[in-house]
């Protein structure tokens, strides 16, 4: 079975993809809601997403994978661990919404070094606001971003803006305004 098709099935089975009327954190309403954490905190879901992302990332010579907390946290962990198991280790990085108020005051947690090639990931791309914040934090550390990935692209302007800014963007699933979700 196609890996991404299975990701869509798991999303429905685990209640990560539900239909109705929902208020979105990015503003507005939607006929569906995607809670990527229900997918990526499920053992099979995490594995399938990690496999799918690693197969995309293989051609980008990525040193690390980063994303905005909290949606990207399980993705980053799953990809990092599986990449090690598969012999292509990528470090995991978590990007805070704002610098830590104590200790080292870090915005990015994890082994980040200037010059690294860092893929940016999130569970969902709507307006792209959280992706752009993570991208800026990574670039502020002197890193290059070869690709931006999401599990679901809501096609609400975020992915278009990522591309307009000169970055490559890919998602596993895409949605339309009617709430139809399919393979990208």
Image (spheres, helix red, strand yellow):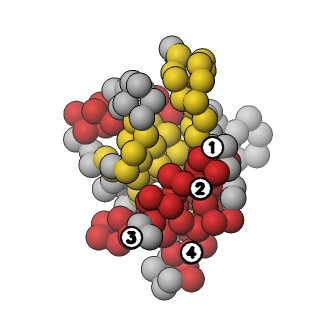
Q: Nearer the viewer, residue 93 or 85?
A: 85
Q: Is residue 101 depicted above or below 116 in this figure?
A: above
**Residue 55 tag number:** 3
Alpha carbons under labels 3 and 4: distance apart: 11 Å
Alpha carbons under labels 1 and 2: distance apart: 8 Å
Count of numbered circles in the view: 4
User: Which label sits in the foreground, 3 or 2?
Assistant: 2
User: Which label sits in the foreground, 4 or 2?
Assistant: 2
User: Which label sits in the foreground, 1 or 3?
Assistant: 1
Q: Would residue 73 be seen by someone viewing this image from the given angle?
A: no
Mark toward the start of the polypeptide (3 vs 2): 2
Answer whether labels 1 and 2 touch (C-beta < 8 Å): yes
The secondary structure type at the circle numbered 1 is loop
Alpha carbons under labels 1 and 4: distance apart: 22 Å
Give the quadrant of residue 159: top left
Alpha carbons under labels 3 and 2: distance apart: 19 Å
Residue highlighted by disc 2: 10
Q: Is residue 91 depicted above or below 100 in this figure?
A: below
Q: Is residue 7 depicted above or below 156 in this figure?
A: below
**Residue 16 tag number:** 1
Q: Nearer the viewer, residue 16 or 129?
A: 16
Q: Quadrant of the N terminus?
A: bottom left
Mark toward the start of the polypeptide (1 vs 2): 2
Instruction: State the residue at coordinates (44%, 58%).
Output: 5
The secondary structure type at the circle numbered 2 is helix
Mark toward the start of the polypeptide (4 vs 2): 2
Mark toward the start of the polypeptide (1 vs 3): 1
The secondary structure type at the circle numbered 4 is helix
Q: Provide residue 112's location: percent of width, then percent of height.
A: 52, 59
């Amino acid at each position: 079975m196609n890996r991404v098709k299975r990701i869509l099935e798991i999303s429905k089975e685990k209640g990560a993809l539900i239909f109705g009327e929902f208020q979105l954190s990015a503003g507005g309403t939607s006929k569906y809601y995607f809670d990527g954490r229900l997918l990526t905190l499920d053992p099979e879901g995490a594995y399938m997403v990690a496999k799918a992302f690693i197969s995309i990332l293989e051609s980008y010579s990525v040193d690390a994978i980063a994303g905005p907390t909290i949606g990207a946290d399980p993705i980053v962990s799953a990809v990092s661990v599986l990449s090690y198991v598969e012999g292509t280790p990528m470090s995991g990085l978590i990007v805070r919404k704002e610098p830590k108020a104590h200790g080292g005051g870090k915005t990015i947690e994890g082994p980040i070094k200037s010059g690294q090639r860092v893929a940016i990931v999130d569970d969902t791309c709507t307006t792209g606001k959280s992706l752009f914040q993570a991208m800026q934090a990574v670039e502020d550390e002197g890193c290059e971003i070869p690709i931006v990935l999401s599990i679901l692209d809501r096609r609400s302007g975020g992915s278009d803006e990522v591309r307009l800014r000169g970055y490559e963007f890919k998602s596993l699933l895409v949605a339309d305004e009617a709430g139809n979700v399919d393979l990208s």
